[in-house]
Image (tube, rainbow, N blue to C red):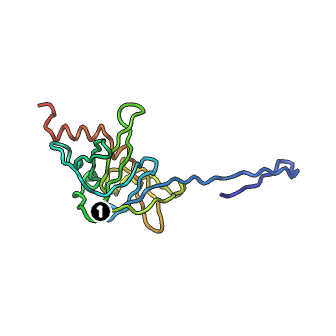
Amino acid sequence: MNALVKTDRKGLGNQVAVQAAVEEKQYLTFMLGGEMFSISILSIKEIIWYANLTEVPMMPACIRGVINLRGAVVPVMDLSNRFGKPSTPVVKSTCIVIIEVPTAVEGEHQNMGVVVDSVQAVLEIPTSEIEPSPSFGAKIRPDFIEGIAKVNGKFVILLNVNRVLSTEEISQMGQVAGGVEAA
């Protein structure tokens, strides 16, 4: 933090220390298809190894299935598929990141898992180092991107979990996949 010293207009020596706080947010970084992404740590409940996934028929292609997490049924999304890319292959380092997502009902949340290639680290990124999402050239939908930060010489895409994991949008995808649309 930088401390600035101000004097009054008359220069009488009344000094007031002003703290210029640099706001930092914490993000969990992970790899997906060779690219580094991140999600605000405030949305993350836990990280588990990929195992015991039950497929559910007639779900959107981006939903791999569900897991039983201490008695609760948690849907698991393949982020790579959600971004319009091939499904994430399951390897030794594959993890499921459990994220708390707001629902259509005000104040309520639902847990959802996302499949990632590997979890990297929790980073503190100053808000001053975060650039807005580009309006062109991104390999995923621009509304999925909260911003882009440069960390250790590499770009990290900060995801907007409310858009990527929108329960309303995923429900609509499931209705189309299940042939429930109006004839």
Image coords of residue 43 (percent x, y): 42, 47
Question: In this view, which residue lies farthest toward the right?
Answer: 12
Question: In this view, which residue lies farthest toward the bottom?
Answer: 153
Residue receiving disc 1: 33
Q: In the figure, is residue 85 to the left or right of 165?
A: left
Image coords of residue 15 (percent x, y): 81, 51
Name the residue at 32% across, 65% down.
34
Image coords of residue 46 (percent x, y): 39, 51
Name the residue at 35% across, 43% down.
111
Name the residue at 32% across, 60% down.
32
Question: In this view, which residue lies farthest toward the front?
Answer: 70
Compare residues 109 and 15 and report the one nearer the observer: 109
Question: Residue flagged by tag 1: what amino acid is it?
Answer: Gly
Q: In the figure, is residue 82 to the left or right of 25?
A: left
Q: How many marks?
A: 1
Quarter of the figure with the N terminus: bottom right
- Answer few, some or many: residues within 10 Å of disc 1's Cα (few below 14, many 20 plus, some between 14 and 19): some
Q: Is residue 178 above or below residue 138?
A: above
Local secondary structure at mark 1 = loop
Image coords of residue 87 (percent x, y): 22, 57
Name the residue at 28% across, 65% down.
92
Compare residues 38 and 181 and report the one nearer the observer: 38
Question: In this view, which residue lies farthest toward the left?
Answer: 183
Examine the image and state in which quarter residue 183 appears: top left
Q: Is residue 67 above or below residue 93?
A: above
